Amino acid sequence: MLKLFALAIAGALGTLARYGLSGFVHRQSRGLFPYGTLVVNLLGCVVIGWVMFLVQEHQAFRPETRVVIVVGFLGGFTTFSAFAYETTELLRGGALLPALLNVLGNVVLGVTGVWLGAVVGRTSGL
Amino acid sequence: MKIEGEALLLRIFIGESDRWKGKPLYEAIVRKAREEGLAGATVLRGLEGFGASSRIHTAKILRLSEDLPIVVELVDREDRIRRILPMLDEMVTEGLITLENVHVVTYRHQSAST
């Protein structure tokens, strides 16, 4: 029960963090490319890469803590549904290149971000 | 009620999150127009827009899809439109209100069959 409660709190915090950061990103950017979703997803990928490196190579977190961070916080922080919706809207508006860039950005850079997170963990010793 | 010929079109540009005494502002405007006996009101939802704050609101990006634009249109004789304007001035604390001259070609409704 405590784990579920912690998960819910972490998820809420992740969602609020996404709301704040994506809003900040959009206020700084011009045009209608979904930078906000891209940034939170990429940042989430880097963090998950780093956390899972710590888990796999250093057993840094207890399983419950890992679930709260990865499933809870990062689950609320990142968003696949917004990425899918915004890509669909780009396609519906005929913005094929931005749609493709959004897919490549979220998927390819996201996977790269996971790798980068692990590299950061390995090289920084954190 | 019958309106024909020269009339005024009142357009009110607001946001869907705008409130008046706890209710959506667009709903309050339509209720007020009906109370004041205006000929009609239509609420239109916009897909995208920006206003005085220059902040874009669009349905295309979820984070920016809060407070999408709403346009309320009212057409009636000048005296009725002018009578409601001070009330709208109090209710619309953020937005745009415009007035245009229009020529009413048709305003009719089908009476209920007996």
Image (spheres, rainbow, N blue to C red):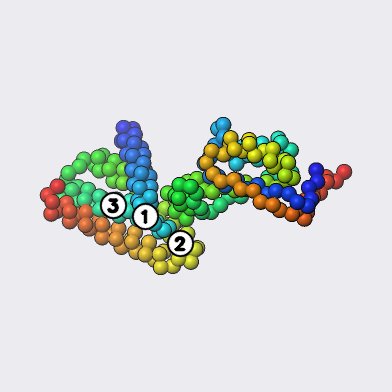
Residue lying at the far right in this picture: please name it: B114
Q: Earlier in the sequence, mark 2 or mark 1?
A: 1
**Do dots 1 and 3 share one subunit?**
yes
Residue A1 coordinates in the image, percent (x, y):
33, 32
Q: Is residue A47 left or right of residue A14?
A: left
Q: Earlier in the sequence, mark 3 or mark 2?
A: 3
Circle 3 — which element?
A: helix
Check disc 1 and report the residue beneath it. Answer: A29
Residues B55 and B48: in front is B55
Tag nearer the camera, 1 or 3:
1
Q: Chain of mark 3?
A: A
Residue A7 coordinates in the image, percent (x, y):
33, 38
User: Based on the displayed image, in which of its 4 quarters is residue A103 positioned?
Assistant: bottom left
Residue B61 in view here: yes
Check disc 2 and report the residue beneath it. Answer: A90
Q: Chain of mark 2?
A: A
**Do dots 3 and 2 share one subunit?**
yes
Tag nearer the camera, 2 or 1:
1
Check disc 3 and report the residue beneath it. Answer: A43
